[in-house]
Image (cartoon, rainbow, N blue to C red):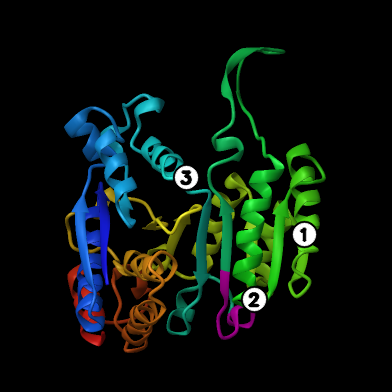
Amino acid sequence: MEFNIALLRGDGIGPEIVDSAVAVLEKTAAKFGHKFSFTPYLIGGCAIDETGIPLPQETIDGCLASDSVLLGAVGGPKWDDQPGSNRPEKALLGIRSALGLFTNLRPAKLYPALRAASPLKDEIVGKGFDIMIVRELTGGIYFGDRGYREGKYGQEAFDTEAYSVTEIERIGRVAFDTAMKRSKRVCSIDKANVLESSRLWRKTMHSLAEEYPEVEYSDMFVDNAAMQLVRDPKQFDVIVTSNMFGDILSDEASQITGSIGMLASASLGETSRGMYEPIHGSAPDIAGQNKANPIATILSGAMMLRYSFGLSAEADAIENAVDKVLEAGCRTADLMGSTEGNPLTCTEMTEKIAEVL
């Protein structure tokens, strides 16, 4: 099979980790008899340098013409003086909207080999945990009306949180369908004791839950969820929540796994085309030093094979290779902790994973 993949390397360590994922994907293609074609496009700070804007139309058109998109990271202090409307991060909202990507899947998995890296006690994490956070991606406060106005105490800024039944239902179905392939448990996170938008969210989710009688459904307030993630993460299977709450909770979940450098993500819409990226940032402090952990981007590539291309065996092969390399004690600098020895470079870790494949 042949697939065309748009590459958005971006800024900082983005080019290094994307190239690592490409190397592993090419090895996978050779092993399973596929062909992946890669076409690079500009996004973020590098796009500003070249074109003056963070998301050129050529990038949008190229991504729309692709079978799927692999993204590195954007941003860095170099572009801090850009106005809010032209910052590198603005490109992320723009490309998600242009591609109609309303779902973000963020697995938070504690690998047994990395249990010592988790800040949580052994009695809490046990043999590990595996959570899938389903985050609504194109609605809510990040896309609502905003601006400045005169208020009670003078000038004030405002951002608007709004959700429709349609937006809630479509992300809810993704969560329930995902749970049906896992442990059949969904926890919906909201703030229905305070927010009207959350009350509609909860009402809609309750109605939707009736269509999935096999799934154990529960609600939880977001402040309690933040506490429960560190008190007992094993209680969760699939978490579904709004854009802002998902942004915060998924970052919290990433930290209890031991390293943000391990966590992949998938952004999906109505079509098979998705955008896949590590959840970490551009790490400009180590850019170009071959120190970055490529695993999150490599695992993002595996998610692309699974969710966009339907290549489950190929995705399993990549994920199993990562497991074996970690079990063998291979570590990049961010995974070392108190472990003795020399950390692997980005290139060396990539080569180890490709060798196991």
Contact between labelled residues 1 and 3, with CB atoms less than 8 Å apart: no
| Quadrant housing the N terminus | bottom left
Q: Residues within 10 Å of mark 3 (few under 14, many from 20)?
A: some
Query: What is the secondary structure assignment of the residue under circle 3?
Result: loop
The amino acid type found where label 2 is placed reads Lys
For the point 38% across and 68% down, the residue is 309
Q: Position of residue 225 (x, y in %)?
A: 69, 59
| Quarter of image, res 207 | bottom right
Magenta segment boundaries in residue numbering: 122-131
- Name the N-terminal-most of marks 1 and 2: 1
Q: Look at 44% across and 79% down and name the residue there.
A: 114
Q: Please determine whether, in this image, residue 198 is positioned above or below residue 83.
A: below
- How far apart are the alpha carbons under marks 3 and 1? 27 Å
Which numbered mark, 3 or 1, is in the foreground of this view?
3
Q: Are marks 3 and 2 in contact (CB under 8 Å)?
A: no
Residue bearing the label numbered 3: 100
Please indicate, yes or no, whether residue 74 appears anywhere in the rendered image: yes
Note whether 118 is above or below 143 in the view shown: below
Closer mark to the observer between disc 1 and disc 2: 1
Q: Quadrant of residue 123?
A: bottom right
Residue ID for mark 1? 219
**Residue 5, placed above or below residue 140:** below
Q: In this figure, which residue is indicated by the disc labeled 2?
A: 234
Amino acid type of the residue tagged 3 in the rendering: Gly
The one nearer the camera, 250 or 104, is 104
Three-letter code for the amino acid on which mark 1 is drawn: Asp
Residue beneath the point at 45% across and 75% down? 117
Which of the marked residues, 3 or 1, is nearer the chain's N terminus? 3
Name the element at disc 1.
strand
